[in-house]
Image (spheres, rainbow, N blue to C red):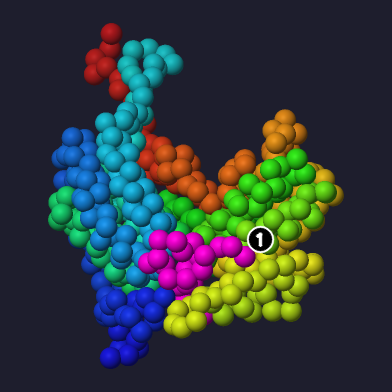
Amino acid sequence: MTDAAFPITSHNPADPSDVLLQIPAPGASGAADAVGRARAAQPDWLLGGAAARSAALGAVAAAIDAAAAELTALAVREVGKPLAEARAEVARTAAIWRYYAQAPYEPVGAVHETAVGPGLLLTRRRPHGVAALITPWNFPFAIPSWKAAPALAAGNAVVLKPAPEATACAQRLAEIVQQALPDEVFTLLPGGATEGQALVSTADAVSFTGSTAVGRDVARAATERGVPVQAEMGGLNAAIVLPDADIERAAAHLAAAIAGYAGQKCTATSRVIAVGAALAPLREALAAALRAVPVGDPADAATVSGPLISEAARDQVGDARRGLSPVVGGTVPDGPGWYAAPTLVEKVPPGHRLLREEVFGPLAVLLPADDLAHAVHLTNSVPYGLVTSVHTADLDATLCGLDRLDTGMIRINAPSTGVDFHLPFGGTKASSHGPREQGRAALEFYTSTRTYTLSPSKAT
C-alpha cells in the first residue's frame, strides 16, 4: 500500500524505509463523534471527586515510569529523537503527570464578604467540558502530557490530535492513560488538518502547539466560536553573549541549543548575537563546538544531532543556508536518513529569511552587536518572542537590559532550550496566543471562574 492509500503514515526519519504505521484518517465525522463521546463522559469524571482524579493521574505517572524503556525506544524510532533526549523526555513526562496528580486537591475558589448586608460572595473555577489538544511531533510524550494532565486534573475530558508523524507515540501514550481513566475521558484522534479543523469547531477549549500559520488559524476559529484558546507557535530565538562571559561555556550551551535534536525545538537558538569583543573568540569557540557535535543514528547514546523529521524538513535547511558564508558546516553520515549538518553562518544580508522565519533545523546566524542595547534591539527585531538566552558574568548590567527584551522567557547563562514544566511557558508576538501553559497557569486556562452571590432567604 502507498502513503496515499493510508493518509496517516509514520516513517522512521533515520531509516525512511522503516514504516511504523499506516492507518486511515477518521475524517471530520470521526472528530465530531470523539468530542460527543468525551462530552458525555465528562460530568461523571468531574463528579467522581478529587481523590479519583488524583489517583488516576498518579497511576498514569507510575505506568509511564514502568514503560520508560519502551517509550524511549519508540520516540527514537518514530521521531528520530536522540536516545539521551528521549530518555529525558520520558522521565519528564512521568514527572508532569505526578505533578498534576496533586492539583485536584488545590483550592478552586475563594470566599468574599458582601459590600452591604449579610451574605457571602464566592468564586469557583469549573472545567470547560471537552478540551481539544493539538500537538506536534517533536515532543511526542511531554507536550500531550503537559496539556492533558492539567485539563484532566481540573475535571475536563480530553481529545488529543497528535501530529501524523508521531501517531505511534500518541497511540502508546493513549493506551497508558486510558487504562487509568474511565472510558471516553481521554480519546485519541489521529489525523491531519481535516480532523484538527473539525476538533476546533466542536470542542469547549482548544490548546495548540505547532506552526505559526496553523496556530493563527486555530486561534481565529476558536475565538470566533467564543471558546478559550491558547496557541504556542514559532520561535526565532536569540542568544546574547557579552564580552565578560565564559566563552567556552557559552559556546557549549549554544552548540547544544543549535544542534540538539537537530534544532527541532521551538526553543532552539537561531541567532547568536556577539557583543563587542566577544565576537572573535565566540566565533572560534562556537565553530569548534558545533564541529564536535556527534551527528548520526539517534539510537546511539553518543548522538546529539539526529535526523530531521522529513525529507522536506532537511531540504528546507539546505535552501535556507544556500549562498551564505558558513563559519562551520559539518559532515553528515552516509546512508539513509534525513540528516543535516550543524551549521553557523555569518554576513547574512538584512531581510534574509533566516532573520524573519523559523527554519527548524541545526542552523544559526552569527550577528555582531556594538553593545547590550544594540543586542537587545537585534533580539527584538524579529516577529517572534519566545525565549532569549543571555551569557555574561555581570548580572547587574544584564538586569538593566532584560526588561527591554520582548520575549516571554529569559535564560541566564543557560541554553535557550529547556523547559521547567511547573512554571508558565509562552512567548510574545507571533510566538504565542492566549494564556500561558504549564504550571498553575495551565489549571487556570482549563477552567473558567464563576461568581456566586449567597443572600439570606429571609430578612434579618
Question: Going by the image, does 289 lie left or right of 130?
Answer: right
Name the quarter where the N terminus is drawn: bottom left
**Viewer-proximal residue among 280 and 207:** 280
- Badge 1 crowding class, 10 Å Cα cut-off, few under 14, some 14 to 19, many 20 or more, is some
Q: Main secondary structure of the magenta part?
A: loop
Quadrant position of the C terminus in the picture: top left
Q: Nearer the viewer, residue 427 or 311?
A: 311
Q: Is residue 329 left or right of residue 375?
A: left
**Residue that badge 1 annotates:** 288
Left or right of residue 271: residue 141: left
Q: Amino acid at mark 1?
A: Ala
* Nearer to us in this view, 133 or 162: 162
Residue 89 locus on image (x, y percent): 38, 53
Is residue 189 found left or right of 378 in the rendered image?
A: left
Which residue is painted at 38% across and 36% down in the image? Answer: 449
How many marks overall?
1
* Residue that appears at 51% across and 77% down: 333
Q: Residue at x 58, y 72 (%)?
A: 341
Determine whether the residue tagged by mark 1 lies in a helix, strand or loop.
helix
From where the camera sits, is residue 199 visible? no
Check if residue 185 falls in the magenta segment. no
What span is in magenta? 291-312
Image-quadrant location for residue 160: bottom left
Quadrant in which residue 172 is drawn: bottom left
Q: Position of residue 151 (x, y in %)?
A: 32, 47
Above or below, 202 against 252 in this view is below
Residue in the picture at 32% in, 16% down: 119
